[in-house]
Image: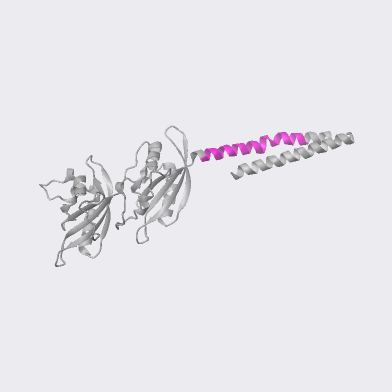
Amino acid sequence: MPAGIDLSRSVKFYYVKLCTCGSLITANDYFNKQFSFSLNINDNRNSKAFIHPGDHAIHQQAIANCLTDPGKKANTTVRMLTEDGCYFLTEWEFSACLNSKGNIEGVEGLGIAYRDFTFDGLSLQMQLQSLRSLSDSSSDGILLLDKNYTILAYNKPAENLSLELYKRQYLTGDDFRAYVRQEVQGDFNRQFNKALNGIISEEIFELGKKDGVKVCLKVQMTPVHDNEGIVSGVAIITKDITLLQNLNNRLNEITAIQSHQIRRPVANMISLVNLMDNGLLTGEQKEYLQLLRVSIAQLEDEIQTIVKTARAI
């Protein structure tokens, strides 16, 4: 545990001391308050009482690693029980606790909930620096997934987008693939694998909402590295570009109108001028006809300029 830091009064970090079998010996007030509903003074306060059953083995392995190699810290991610029967994701750092003779007498654990992510310089497994970017002031939806597609954290815009598209809320610990539409599953997996290989990429996805309205999303996936520089997860940044895409579509329509519908009467005028130039015109009439040709050519140039400008937007 960090030297010189009193965790007994922390309202941000969980601190526990476990025996070698994983039962809870003592904990700080923050932990006891959070999990008082599952701590029964009449039993051995086994840590399994407040950990998701699917994560029991992960938790026990982290403790075993500390006992096997007391000189190293063991990091793990587990889901913790809430009073209403749900679970939320937590990150833990365990280390062996030695007595004055250097013998192992238990394991100390320092934990943080992803819903309360503030790092303050303490060393946990995931780069919580990534989580600082999950600002609700951003207009972009941001999610953090681990390598197995598990949702670790998300900001408010991402939550709103989930409710808008799927009529359901993201939950930490869920497999994000359950939220990905079938028609874009292949593209999503390909982009996710790129991020796991250290490549930042952007894709555009067009999805239909429940009411049939189309939503256009620009999705950037960025690899997230742990303290050793190894990719440990993926940050997904989603920007709603529906309005911009609609504007581009409208500009394309305008370009088509300018390119074809306006050019048609211009072409007709050129044909009429050619028919009028039959050799029976007076010199003055031919001069007027030439001025008309110049004006038509200038109009054609202006149309070309408008079309090129519209296509460049």
- Where does residue 41 sit, x and y in percent of width and height? 11, 47
Q: Residue at x 71, y 42 (%)?
A: 301
The overriding secondary structure of the stretch rendered in magenta is helix
Label count reads 0
245 in the magenta segment: yes
Q: Quadrant of residue 65?
A: bottom left
In the visual, does 84 lie left or right of 145? Answer: left
In the visual, does 222 lie left or right of 4? Answer: right
Answer above or below: position of 248 versus 30.
above
Answer above or below: position of 240 versus 59.
above
- List the single residue furthest toward the bottom: 101
- List the single residue furthest toward the top: 211
- In this picture the colour scheme is one colour
Q: Residue at x 16, y 53 (%)?
A: 26
Q: Nearer the viewer, residue 223 or 128?
A: 128
In the visual, does 166 lie left or right of 95? Answer: right
Quadrant position of the C terminus in the picture: top right
- Where does residue 153 sit, x and y in percent of width and height? 34, 47
- Magenta-drawn segment: 244-270
Q: Nearer the viewer, residue 180 or 289?
A: 289
Quadrant position of the N terminus in the picture: bottom left
- Where does residue 278 sit, x and y in percent of width and height? 86, 35
In the visual, does 64 lie left or right of 277? Answer: left
Q: Does any portion of residue 278 appear in the rendered image?
A: no
- Where does residue 42 sit, x and y in percent of width and height? 10, 47
Q: Does any portion of residue 244 appear in the rendered image?
A: yes
Q: Quadrant of residue 22?
A: bottom left
147 in the magenta segment: no
- List the single residue furthest toward the left: 42
